[in-house]
Amino acid sequence: MGMPMGLPGAIDRPHEGPNVAALFASLSIPHHLGSPHAVQPEAIPYFGGKRMSLSPEEATERVKGFALHLGADLVGIAEINPLWVYSTRGHIMDDNWERWGSEIELSHPYAIAFAMEMSRDMVWTAPHTASVVESGLVYAKVAFVATELASFIANLGYSATANHFQHYDVLLVPMAVDAGLGEVGRLGLLMTEEFGPRVRLGCVTTDLPLIPDGPVDIGVEDFCRVCKKCADGCPSKSIPLDAPREVNGTFRWRLNAETCFEYWARIGTDCCLCMRVCPWSHPGTPPHRLIAELVVRNQVARRIFSSMDDLFYGKKPKPASPPKWASYGE
Ligand code: SF4
Ligand code: SF4
């Protein structure tokens, strides 16, 4: 999900102005940070391109620890599957249009994938403008973490590329799955055990030798087979109601990205309604943590809690009110 097309904030007209201003303020940050995306060690004057000698174990510990220290909430390492690398450049955010359609060549063998939590209170206002204020803010935070992490690796003497709102070489969701951050849910987003789909993703690719993590099974597919809350609530009917199927060699639910994006363009936000209603998006309070732990480990708990969510929160819960500073009228 990213910047909506169409009239920004249209759903909250005529009160959308301050929230749209906050959105664009955040989206300007990746632009300021984003060049150059690939950081080569020769460009770092302090160590003159000399490689520091680090074992993969130590490098992994330092890179993961620094990512968390910078503000990432979850971090994992994946070996890069070439299937997750875009073939040609189709996302131009710096007006450098001659690069459009050029081949993407990526020689880095590793990806450091990370997730950052989005505020539950802001996401709970979806699809109104306060939720897209949060999307923009977390895109900016992701850009900061990715850029600084890539720069850190270059200072160690290795090549690194920051992937964030301004520049993507790789598909972030399957990369995050390979790095063990979660599974893909019915709504087509990464579902984490800690925050459900209420996260934004970033990634740094590198030739620094690291120790990869592996995919995890936290019961998402089993839960989503019963729960259809996102599909029932989706205003553009973009989320499938049936079972997952094979799509381009992977077994999953396929979101209709075109109809989803058309809806964004109509309302002028990135909607996020599916993220809001998902039972996995609840805040990390002690009762919700306990339920999440049961759901991850036990199939019976998945059946019970997918129905109980409807009882507690309703089948089609309404958006919550925003904080006063992000209000948008009635
Ligand atoms: S239109 Fe549907 S799939 Fe797209 S963000 Fe909204 S709820 Fe999710
Ligand atoms: S709302 Fe239900 S079906 Fe949709 S992603 Fe969340 S758990 Fe899965």
Image (spheres, rainbow, N blue to C red):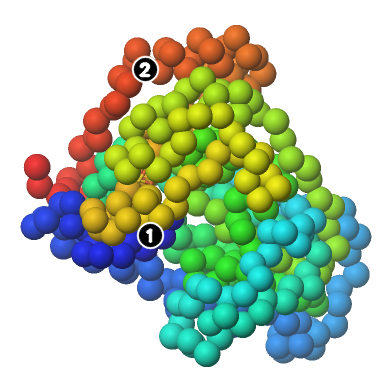
Q: Secondary structure at mark 2?
A: helix
Q: Which mark is residue 136?
A: 1
Q: Give the residue type that dot 2 points to.
A: Asp
Q: Position of residue 167 (x, y in %)?
A: 55, 72
Q: Quadrant of the C terminus?
A: top left
From what the image shows, is residue 117 above or below residue 60? above
Q: Position of residue 272 (x, y in %)?
A: 36, 45
Circles 1 and 2 in contact, beta carbons < 8 Å? no
Measure the C-alpha gap from mark 1 to mark 2: 30 Å
Please identify the quarter of the rendering in which residue 235 is found.
top left
Q: Quadrant of the N terminus?
A: bottom left
Look at the numbered disc 1 and say if its residue's Cβ is closer than 8 Å to ligand 1: no
Q: Secondary structure at mark 1?
A: helix
Q: Which mark is residue 310?
A: 2
Q: Is residue 314 left or right of residue 306?
A: left
Q: Position of residue 55 (x, y in %)?
A: 91, 60
Residue in the picture at 78% in, 42% down: 214
Q: Is residue 146 visible?
A: yes
Residue in the picture at 76% in, 88% down: 42
Residue in the picture at 36% in, 63% down: 3
